[in-house]
Image (cartoon, rainbow, N blue to C red):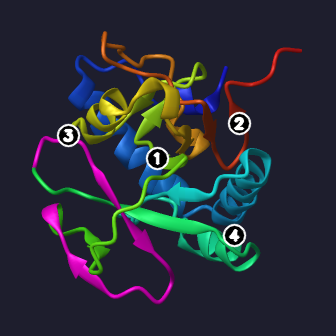
Amino acid sequence: MNPSIARNPIPESKNALRKTLLEARLHAALQPGGEAALSRRLLDALKRHEPACVGFYWPLQGEFDARGAIAIWLATGGRRQASLPVIRTRHEALEFHAWAPDTPMKTGHHRIPEPASGQVVTPDLLVIPCVGFDAQGYRLGYGGGYYDRTLAAWPAATRPVTVGVAYEACRTDTLQREAHDIPLDLIITDAACYPQPAA
């Protein structure tokens, strides 16, 4: 049995599960080697999918900070772009604005920093933070539904590759799925990748 599952008993609601997993994530983020392992797996995923433009996220408390890995990726390719999500209107799909390590930032909705330039770009790969996840690629977020709305509004033919980022301690078998949930293409953790290839 996955030890993280043993630490995350079945809650009575999605909010209870979210609270439990946020606590597990805070503890996992303090463990040595986790950030380095996630950086390696993220760079491996970017090498495998070869995107021209990556959308990622500004790290909140307990989240893996992808900025270092993204900066390395940008520096090793000539025409690569990175971007961060911007909430133009609450409860609407996200917009993505160009980001580089020296980009001026401003405070956006939910007090999350966002690029000040306003240059809109279209990522072909999204790096998405996960509060929790299951082995089939389904994700639990913060409950705002921003990524669900963003992916649902994206034309299927041009939908970006989706790479979730989580700590292994946040994997659970108790994840409740809803009709609008879209599994991510890949979820990377400090210990593994999901869905795992068939043996």
Q: Which residue is mark 4?
A: 73
Q: CA distance from mark 2 to mark 4?
A: 20 Å
Q: Is residue 13 above or below residue 93?
A: above
Q: CA distance from mark 3 to mark 1?
A: 14 Å
* Residue shown at 58% from the left, 19% from the top: 136
Q: Which mark is residue 193?
A: 2
Name the kind of residue labelled 1 in the image. Answer: Ile
Name the kind of residue labelled 3 in the image. Answer: Gly
Q: CA distance from mark 3 to mark 2?
A: 25 Å
Residue 30 percent across, percent down from the top left = 54, 64
Mark 2 or 1, which is nearer the eye?
A: 1
Q: Which mark is residue 16?
A: none
Q: Earlier in the sequence, mark 3 or mark 1?
A: 1
Mark 4 or 3, which is nearer the eye?
A: 4
Question: Residues at badges 4 and 3 in contact (C-beta under 8 Å)?
Answer: no
Point out the image quarter for the C terminus.
top right
Q: Quadrant of residue 87?
A: bottom left
Q: Is residue 71 visible?
A: yes
Q: CA distance from mark 2 to mark 1?
A: 14 Å
Q: Quadrant of residue 99?
A: bottom left
The kind of secondary structure element at disc 1 is: strand
* Residue shown at 30% from the left, 31% from the top: 153
Compared across the picture, whether 60 is left or right of 100 comes to left
Q: Count residues near mark 3 (Cα–Cα under 10 Å), then give few for <14, some for 14-19, many for 20+.
A: few
Q: CA distance from mark 4 to mark 3?
A: 29 Å
Q: Which residue is mark 1?
A: 128
Name the kind of residue labelled 4 in the image. Answer: Trp
Question: Quick check: is 191 in the magenta stretch?
Answer: no
Q: Earlier in the sequence, mark 3 or mark 2?
A: 3
